[in-house]
Structure formats: C-alpha cells, structure tokens
Image (cartoon, rainbow, N blue to C red):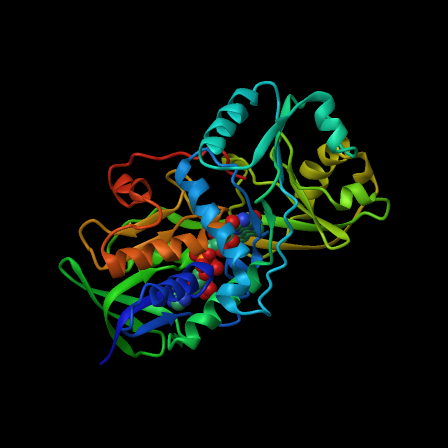
Amino acid sequence: MEHVDIAIVGGGVVGSATAYYLRKHGFSGSIAIIEKDTTYQFGCTGRSLGGLRQQFSTPENIELSKFGLKLLRNLKQEFGPEADVSFHENGYLIMASAEGLPILEENHRIQLANGADNIILKGSDLAARFSWLMDDGVAGGCFGLSGEGWLDPYSLMTLLRKAAVATGVKIIPHELTTVNRSGDKITSVILSNGEALSCSSLVNAAGTAAGHVASLANIELPVGPRKRYVYLLDCPQASEALHGAPLTVEPTGIYFRPEGRNFLCGLSPEEHEEPAEMNWEVDYSWFEERIWPPLAERVPQFETIKVINAWVGQYDYNALDQNAIIGAHPEVTNFYFANGFSGHGLQQGPAAGNAIAELIVHGTYRTIDLARLGYDRVARDEPLFEKNVI
Ligand SMILES: Cc1cc2nc3c(=O)[nH]c(=O)nc-3n(C[C@H](O)[C@H](O)[C@H](O)COP(=O)(O)OP(=O)(O)OC[C@H]3O[C@@H](n4cnc5c(N)ncnc54)[C@H](O)[C@@H]3O)c2cc1C
C-alpha cells in the first residue's frame, strides 16, 4: 500500500491552502490532495461571490479574514509578479433597520477593537456617500473604508494549488470512498479506483461533503450542502457611482455588488424556505418575487434590469452555528477538520489552511488562537454564533 504523510481530501481553497501552508511551515514529508473533480466546477470555491470583509461579530472571524487580506496585500511576494486575483477594495455596506441597529453598532465596536477600518453612517451621511441609495427604513449602515471588497475565487484557489504542487504536493484525481480507522487513529483511505493509501494524518477539506467524509470515520460533523442562487444583472441605466458601489447588504439580507459592467445579487433563504432538492437548477422566481421588488425600491436604477445569467452554488453549511469547525478531532487526533464555513470560507480559506498547518507542524496555533472554533463545541452541542451571516 502506498503511504502519504498528510492526505487532504478536497482541493478547493481550503485544501489547497492547507497544502501550501504546510510547506511554508517547513513540512518536508509527503502530501497528497485527493480531489474527485479536478475541473473544480461544482465546489463551493468556484461558485463563490468572492467577498472579503471584517464585518463579523466574532473576533476569530475578523482575524481569519484579516489573514486573507494580508495574503492579498502580499500576493506578488508570495506567488510572483504575475499573480493577480482582481481584488476590488470597494468595501462592504451592511445596513440595518431601527430594530437591527443596536446589533450593527455592537458588531462595529467588536470590529474596531480587532483592527477593522470601518464606520457607521446614518441619515444624510449615508445618502451623501451613496447617491444611488434610497435609505427608507435604514437606520444605519456599516461601511468598510479599507480592507474589504471582493476577489476572483478561482484565481486564489489556483495560485495556492499551483504553488503547493510546485513544492511536490501530489494531486490524486479520485474520490475518497472509505476511511479506515483503528481505535483513535485514522490509518488509511480507499479511493474510487480501488487503491488504498495509508496516511499519518487526514485533513477533511471536503466542502459541502465534509459531513459525509467525517461519517466515513464514524464521526458526526453537522456540515452539508445548502443551495444558494446568484443572479447576474445587466442594468443599462446604472450610473458610474452605482458601478463603484460596495458589496451592499440590505436590512432584508438581499445583497448585490458590481461585477465588471454588470451586477451580481442574491438572498439566502430563511430556514423554512431552504430548497429541499440539492440540484443545480436555478429558481428564477426567487429573484422575481423575493429579490427584485425590494432591491428596486432600495436602488431605483435597478427598476430596469435584465437577468443575463444565474448559477447555483452550495454553501458548506454548518447547521450547528454557521461558523467554521477548525482543528483536530479531540479523540481521533490525526483527523483534522477545516469545514462548515457557511458562506465565508473563501476569505477564511488561507487562514484555515495556515491554522491546520500550524497544528500539524508545531502542535499548536501560532498566528490566530482558534480553540473556540474547534470540534469540542460540536461534541458539547454549544454553538458559537456569528451574528453577521450573509
Ligand atoms: C453562492 C456562494 C457564495 C459565496 N460567497 C462567499 C463570499 O462572498 N465570501 C466568502 O468568503 N465565501 C463565500 N462562499 C463560501 C466559500 O465559497 C466556501 O466556504 C469555500 O469556498 C469553501 O472552500 P472548500 O475548499 O472548503 O470547499 P470546496 O471549494 O467545495 O472544495 C471541496 C472539494 O472537495 C472535493 N471533494 C468532496 N468530497 C470528496 C471526496 N469524497 N473525495 C475527493 N474529493 C472530494 C470537492 O470536489 C471539492 O472540490 C460562497 C459560497 C457560495 C456557494
């Protein structure tokens, strides 16, 4: 049986970052990424909106995203002069109604305490900065002055993967179908081509399939797919100011952002509205009925738009508390998780990969203390809620 020191299941942004940072932390043993779809077309990463923000309510989430920002700032030093992920530093604007304002302000205090560069805007200040916005029912908005925006997810994932491969990381283009465990140790995995691979450690970076992969080792992990729709809009009458908009989130949760000369938008459903079928079919009535009317009221220029494309992406959803689960399993200690990012894993992928690499190489976190995001809270059924889930 072939042996690999570290087997990583999943080659999206998280698995690629894990491999990349293992090498950066000096790990010289063998590393393999097991990836069933080397076109990466169905993974979360390629279907993500690419947003990066500091507007979270949990210090760990702010730190994880700041790590991603630092990587973007150093992109060319890390990956060479040609490296580019089209980072648009336009900020986020997250708005709240009167009812939601105290939470927005409390989150803002936590963000400032953790080094975020954002401000609360109200009334005429909001209208003055964003001329295209109707602020009826908006009590305030938190706007990122710097360090927030969006990037091209596929490019970031590809940079990380290629850099990892350049250091000898192997990509195995098969599905992991079986995990063999002897007591408290993962010993080997079996692939869809029938080959077995023994491993010293296994990293679960399987995105929406993370819960399934954990179950192969008889471990419960509350992570599975949640269907989301993203719509691409053409808006011929959009002003230049609107083309320069931040990633804007309405008090209802409807969001939009510019994409080239077009716009992307979406809305996560309430729990009772979650689509039951996990297929790749777009529901256009979700846009017509739930998104467009309030969106056009908020931004009157969106009254004349055309949906020119749309796609389904599946969130890697942590049903316990919509936060990442990062770290080793407390008993099966050579099984590591970096899962359940629930809509913020693109920006947190580099930091999550770095965190797993630190645990494997140094036995402890060195950059960000992520103990509170560990599996323990799942075992104890003690959620750590994030108030800003988009
Ligand atoms: C519509 C949408 C919008 C989003 N917007 C944002 C955003 O604005 N900002 C943000 O930060 N995040 C966003 N996200 C979330 C983010 O995309 C994900 O959290 C992140 O990409 C997760 O990366 P990953 O590497 O864990 O998963 P993935 O990219 O899904 O990679 C997992 C890989 O594992 C492989 N795999 C699974 N099971 C197996 C197996 N048994 N054997 C072999 N391979 C396997 C899959 O093929 C896949 O390639 C969004 C997600 C969606 C769907």
Quadrant of res 186: bottom left
Q: Position of residue 23 (x, y in %)?
A: 35, 68
Q: Quadrant of the N terminus?
A: bottom left
Using the rendered view, name the quadrant where residue 165 is placed: bottom left
- How far across and down, in percent of the image, does residue 254 sit? 64, 37
**Percent position (x, y) of residue 296?**
77, 35
The C terminus, quarter of image:
top right
Residue 166's image quarter? bottom left
Left or right: 286 in relation to 345: right
In the rendering, at what x and y percent does residue 59 appear? 41, 36
Whether residue 24 is situated above or below residue 50 in the rendered picture? below
- Residue 227 appears in view: no
**In the image, what residue occupies the spot 33% across and 44% down?**
370
Residue at screen point 32% across, 72% down: 31
Depth check, front residue: 327 or 46 = 327
What residue sits 40% from the left and 60% below the top?
206
Q: Relative to 73, is 138 above or below?
A: above
Task: Please tell me which residue lies in front, 286 or 127.
Answer: 127
Q: Farthest residue in the left direction?
A: 183
Q: Is residue 213 left or right of residue 102?
A: left
Could you tell me if residue 271 is visible in this image?
yes
**Nearer to the camera, 330 or 123:** 123
